[in-house]
Amino acid sequence: MDPSAQASRRTLLRLAAAGAAGGTLAAAPAPAFARPARDGRTGDRCSLPHTLTVTAPGLYPEGVSWDRGRGAFIVGSSAQGTLSVVRADGSVTTLTAPFARVSVLGVHVDAPRGRVLATYTDFFFRKLGMVDTSLPPVNGVGVFDLATGAVQRLVPVSTGAAEPRTNDVTVDRHGDVYVTDTEVDTITRIGRDGGVRQVIHDERFTTDDTGPNGIVHHPGGFLLMGRYAGGRLFRVEHPRSARPRVSEVRLDRAPVSIDGLAVRPDGSVIVVANDLSLPGGLPGRDSVIVLRSTDGWRTARTVRDDTWPFGDPTTAAVTPYGDYVISGGIREILTGTPSPTPGRFQLRRR
């Protein structure tokens, strides 16, 4: 095992042990708050600081979603296999306890149906020899009760693949769930009953590097999916039909990568880019980009491109108080390189 893999293995063992302690995680001192705003759904006053620095040893979240009912974020853990609630004061409480030795990556709050969707995979543990590799990979999407965190259903995805890695998740207006697999280069559609309905693949999804990553359901009725390698964006029309139509969105300039995606209320799309998985030698840049389209996402132009001040941002959550980008320190999980802020992560408003 090479030194970086040994370091990653030590990191995961240490962080998994920290997670086993369970309970409520410590919070960093809360920054000053912006003027309180009223939540239109609950009537409660809620506010968020511009930057929320959270102390949560061992959490290392990659995915984040906004829970409007709580007025809080829900994040996954790439080390502990949990879902946690992060409130505006920086406090963190566990919503869903570990249900397997997995990383929880993509997170999506499906408020109309009272559930949280989250992808899970033992890909990193398997790569580091920390699970029994004679057994099939553990890889799929979990459906959890939004109020209690109880497991409603675990749906295996990419069954039979040698090295699957579910990554991100979204839901359409019918309640069908769509899951990307970064290694198998697919989008899987899952019905509300938990049955796998369809596997969507296009040769343009395929890459020797990191493949399908962020995914969103656009209010226009189609999916937008980002392939990490090459920063390519795809539009998937009629995803519930027998033959979905896949086309590439022509961008005015391609990001260095596409990790997370988020749709804003005006229909524009946030793209989060980083160099976490770029092939060796390629220049990297942490950035948050806003794309806008005037032709139904056949083409899109860049209307904002911000170099991000916190390292390795992965995705964004759209809230009534602004768009928040998460930097969860997962480079330590991937490479074993110690985080510059160990035990902490940031949520920063774009």
Image (spheres, rainbow, N blue to C red):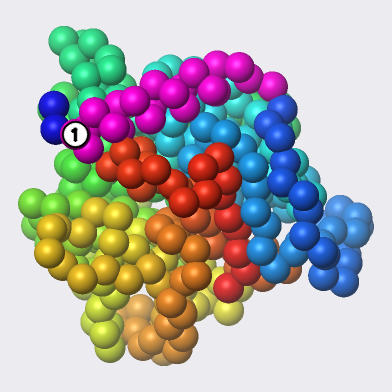
148 vs 29, nearest the viewer: 29
Rendered location of residue 65, percent (x, y): 58, 51
In the depicted structure, whether residue 52 falls above or below residue 163? below
Q: Residue at x 36, y 88 (%)?
A: 301
Residue at figure coordinates x 8%, y 51% from the top left: 208
Coordinates of residue 50 in the picture (x, y in percent)? 70, 68
Secondary structure predominantly adopted by residues drawn in magenta: helix
Reading the image, the residue beneath label 1 is 3
Q: Is residue 287 above or below residue 293?
A: above
Q: From where the camera sits, is residue 173 visible?
A: no
Count of all numbered marks drawn on residues in the image: 1
Quick one: 111 or 222, which is closer to the camera?
111
Which amino acid lies under the numbered mark 1 shown in the image of this protein? Answer: Pro
- Locate residue 247: give its quadrant: bottom left
Residue 79 inside the magenta-drawn segment? no
Q: Residue at x 84, y 58 (%)?
A: 46
Stretch in magenta: 3-23
Under circle 1, the secondary element is helix
Task: Check residue 19 for magenta coloring.
Answer: yes
Q: Position of residue 255 (x, y in %)?
A: 29, 75
219 on left or right of 337: right
The percent position of residue 209, horizontal first and vertical second, equals 14, 53
In the figure, residue 165 lies in which quadrant? Answer: top left
* Quadrant position of the N terminus in the picture: top left
Is the residue marked by circle 1 packed among few (<14), some (14-19), or many (20+) residues within 10 Å? few
Residue 60 versus residue 218 in the image, above or below: above
Residues 20 and 339: in front is 339
In the rendered image, is residue 36 in sight? yes
| Picture quarter with the C terminus | bottom right
Residue pictured at 24% horizontal, 28% vertical: 6
